[in-house]
Amino acid sequence: MEWIDLRSDTVTQPTPAMREAMANAEVGDDVYDEDPTVNQLQELAAHMTGKEAALFVPTGTMGNLASILAHCQRGDEVMLGKRSHIYLFEAGGISALGGIHSCQLPNQPDGSLLLSDLEAGIRDDDPHEPVTRLICLENTHNRCGGTFQTPAYMKQVSEFAHARGLRVHLDGARLFNSSIAQGMDVKEITRHVDSLTFCLSKGLSAPVGSLICGTRDFIRRAYRQRKILGGAMRQAGIVAAAGIVALETMVNRLAEDHARARRLADGLRGNRGLILDTPTPATNMVFASLAESVSMSAQEAAKKLNALGVKVGAVSERGFRMVTHCWIDDGMVDAAVAAFDEALTVPVNA
């Protein structure tokens, strides 16, 4: 069976060009700063995001954790969204390993944080309270439907933070989806933040890795945190080579994933058993919920879809997330729509 895997863009596999680059990569010991391919990837990432330097890490979770540890001391506080990936899906690492407190603020439907909520969240200079040190944003925003934040918003939050002596870190796991959706250079989004991470192993289709980007001094501190977290690698150029190909060849084609997400949403809109959470996807994610007329749970529906060759993410008792990527073509989108029609047959008089 040929699977139609819409669970995430993390299921992508390296392209033939990536595999060739990996096989032929020039490598050295990266801990000694002697892997030329890793160095090339880091220089490319820094250039593309408009930052002074970059650091290659194994995962996005490690990238965010090392960044926050580099910004904060034990007992400091980070302000972030209640629906952010750092808060929901990174195992509480900032608290468990960094002793860093989190102030969780409500995300708006587009994933943004209100300046008024940020203002109210800043702690007074009181020895009874943690010290507010950092604001974390997410762009695109996963659990808010793959929505993106505009450069104007990024500038607004950064100016707010800097005026109060705070720093801003951007979880940009799908940063290039945001830039492509807005039709702009990624530097327009990143120019105001103090640090950022982005993933190579999602829509960009590399097998592993993320980049941390920021000032040289910040990257020096993040480098130390990467070592503490066990993320220092040796001949990592083998996987870095795939990352270079990803950045050089896979960014512009993300527009195809966005188009297919809209095609998927258009097809599912006619299913009487589904309600689209966002009528028009902002990027490559489609979120939908079961209509009241459907008695089964999302998990049960996902099992029926699985039997039909379609894998989707059941993200709540009644909700699904579907993510398009370079391994999903138009025919697969149409087949997924047909599978939903078969799995969620609703009586006409329901």
Image (cartoon, rainbow, N blue to C red):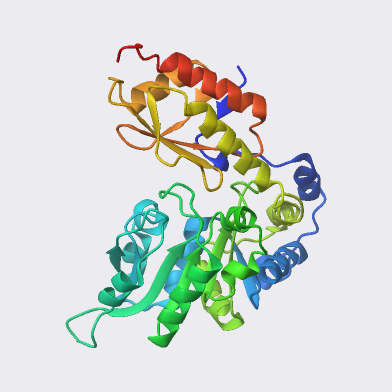
The part of the image, by quadrant, that contains residue 19 is top right
Note whether residue 227 is visible. no
Locate residue 88, reporting x and y percent: 35, 53
Q: Nearer the viewer, residue 48 or 184?
A: 184
User: Which residue appears at 64% of the width and 46% of the height?
Assistant: 207
- Residue 130, percent from left and from top: 25, 78
Q: Quadrant of the N terminus?
A: top right
**Residue 16 visible to an observer of this rendering:** yes
Coordinates of residue 256 in the picture (x, y in percent): 67, 41
Q: Position of residue 157 (x, y in %)?
A: 44, 74
Tell me if residue 204 comes above or below residue 271 in the rendering: below
Question: Does 288 sit left or right of 30 as displayed?
Answer: left
Identify the residue shown where x is 71% and y is 63%: 41
Residue pushed farthest front? 349
Question: What residue is shown at x 32% (from left), y 76% (from top)?
Answer: 74
- Quadrant of the rendered structure where residue 174 is? bottom right
Q: Is residue 209 above or below residue 8?
A: below
Direction from residue 344 to residue 173 in the image, left or right: right
Which quadrant: the C terminus?
A: top left
Q: Nearer the viewer, residue 153 or 162?
A: 153
Q: Is residue 248 above or below residue 13?
A: below
Q: Residue at x 47, y 17 (%)?
A: 341
The single residue placed furthest to the left in the displayed view is 128
Q: How many marks?
A: 0
